[in-house]
Image: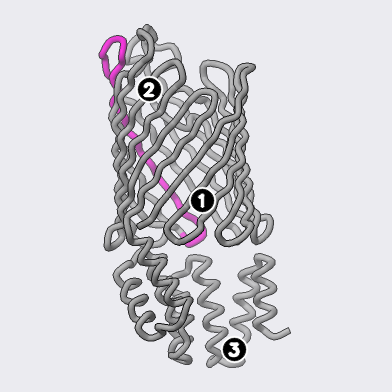
């Protein structure tokens, strides 16, 4: 086999470092091999080493200035680094130099689409909740993004909660960002409320910062503050939550996430608004790529939210990519409630992206709780202008 065939074989087997070494060995023999520099640039880009990847692509471009792949590689590193100004200039230049190259034109088209606004709608239903979500996102010209969202979450037979959310994210580079979210929620109950912990409304402020220690390991700290008003007494109290998380990509195939934190909230049976408790949080998860097309992920979370209802949540996802625009997803969720009981949900969905603008997911789920069960539809639609 040629060095290129050997490298491709290592890539197919998820041994990226071995493929990288093959390219380096080839360049030690012939440092003017532009194809080997492009191969190095591609793997380094996958690994998140964007500066090194760009340097490799630049050497390939200097050796073969008429090859569009190296120019596209350079531009993609700027895009991944959220340097949209440089990326826009790169795609414009590539379109001008290679007007007949389909890959260049498609890459420039995809970039333009990612910069445009998006709208989305989502419907979810299980035994306990029925949720409708509408939203819009606006990528800004540089390293920023704004998202608006409206959610109507109905706890069947108990209440309807209406949420308005706005999220602002500022990116400093790959896996390095600061995110701020504001959420306003109002409850309306179907029957008179006598439970002291019944909520009237709340505001929520969340600040999240992610920092890559290495391209393979990213740390995240999240702080959430929620001033809340009770329906029964109109008293107010403040909940807080702080979380630390570390995501590690040990190999192209295997990744983990571990997290911990502290939650301050009302007790299960509060008698006053000062009846707060501190609870420790735990999060662990793994993801593993079975083949080039199949991936499995599992996560376990204690106290996943500030709503004081779920003790822990277990999630499992199996996805399979049938072709570029079609994949299927099998999901399993187990909710352990603080007031007793649990809920199991199995869902099967089909995700379809017929063109660069449209993203559709439709499916059905089976839910079981407290001796009851049912089958319900789910759907998500995203359109990018």
Mark found first going from the N terminus, 2 or 1: 2
Span of residues in magenta: 214-236
Place residue 292 in its image quadrant: bottom right
Left or right: 55 in relation to 13:
left
Magenta-colored stretch includes residue 225: yes
Is residue 170 at least partly visible in the picture? no
**Which residue is more in the foreground, 282 or 338?**
338
At x 31%, y 28%, the residue is: 185
Few, some or many C-alpha atoms within 10 Å of disc 3 (few <14, some 14-19, many ≥20)?
few
Place residue 81 in its image quadrant: bottom left
Point out residue 71 in the picture as x, y percentages from the top left corner: 43, 81
**Which residue is more in the foreground, 229 or 126?**
126
Is residue 211 at least partly visible in the picture? yes
Left or right: 63 in relation to 88:
right
At x 29%, y 70%, the residue is: 85
Q: Answer above or below: position of 20 versus 30.
A: above
Point out residue 2 in the picture as x, y percentages from the top left corner: 70, 85
Point out residue 219 in the picture as x, y percentages from the top left corner: 45, 50
Instruction: Report the residue marked by disc 2.
Output: 160
At x 31%, y 10%, the residue is: 232
Q: Quadrant of the C terminus?
A: bottom left
Instruction: Report the residue marked by disc 1.
Output: 247
Which residue is situated farthest in the right direction here?
A: 1
Q: Secondary structure at mark 3?
A: helix
Q: Answer above or below: position of 273 versus 296.
A: above
Q: Secondary structure at mark 2?
A: strand
Q: Quadrant of the N terminus?
A: bottom right
Instruction: Report the residue marked by disc 3.
Output: 28
Q: Are marks 1 and 3 in contact (CB under 8 Å)?
A: no
Q: Tell me how far mark 3 sits from mark 2, CA to CA.
A: 66 Å
């Amino acid at each position: 086999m040629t060095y290129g065939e050997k490298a491709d074989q290592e890539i197919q087997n998820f041994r990226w470092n071995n493929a990288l070494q093959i390219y380096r060995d080839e360049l030690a023999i012939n440092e003017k091999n532009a194809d080997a520099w492009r191969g190095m640039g591609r793997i380094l880009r996958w690994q998140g080493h964007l500066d090194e990847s760009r340097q490799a692509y630049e050497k390939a471009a200097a050796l073969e200035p008429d090859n569009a792949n190296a120019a596209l590689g350079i531009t993609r590193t700027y895009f991944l680094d959220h340097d949209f100004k440089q990326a826009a200039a790169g795609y414009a230049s590539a379109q001008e130099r290679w007007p007949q190259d389909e890959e260049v034109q498609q890459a420039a088209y995809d970039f333009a689409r990612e910069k445009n606004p998006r709208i989305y709608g989502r419907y979810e239903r299980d035994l306990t909740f029925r949720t409708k979500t509408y939203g819009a996102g606006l990528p800004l010209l540089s390293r920023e993004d704004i998202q608006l969202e409206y959610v109507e979450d109905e706890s069947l037979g108990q209440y309807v909660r209406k949420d308005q959310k706005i999220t602002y994210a500022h990116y400093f580079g790959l896996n390095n960002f600061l995110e701020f979210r504001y959420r306003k929620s109002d409850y309306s109950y179907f029957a008179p409320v006598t439970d002291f912990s019944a909520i009237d409304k709340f505001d929520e402020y969340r600040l999240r910062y992610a920092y890559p220690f290495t391209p393979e390991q990213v740390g995240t700290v999240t702080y959430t503050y929620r001033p809340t008003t009770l329906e029964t007494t109109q008293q107010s109290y403040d909940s807080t939550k702080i979380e630390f998380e570390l995501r590690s990509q040990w190999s192209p195939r295997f990744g983990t996430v571990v997290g911990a934190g502290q939650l301050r909230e009302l007790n299960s049976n509060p008698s006053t608004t000062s009846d707060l408790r501190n609870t420790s949080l735990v999060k662990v998860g793994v993801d593993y790529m079975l083949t080039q097309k199949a991936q499995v992920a599992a996560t376990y979370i204690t106290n996943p939210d500030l709503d004081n209802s779920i003790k822990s949540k277990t999630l499992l996802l199996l996805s399979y990519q049938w072709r570029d625009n079609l994949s299927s997803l099998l999901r399993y969720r187990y909710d352990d409630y603080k007031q007793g009981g649990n809920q199991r949900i199995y869902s099967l969905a089909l995700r379809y992206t017929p063109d660069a603008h449209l993203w559709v997911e439709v499916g059905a789920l089976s839910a079981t709780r407290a001796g009851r069960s049912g089958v319900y539809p789910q759907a998500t639609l995203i359109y990018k202008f």
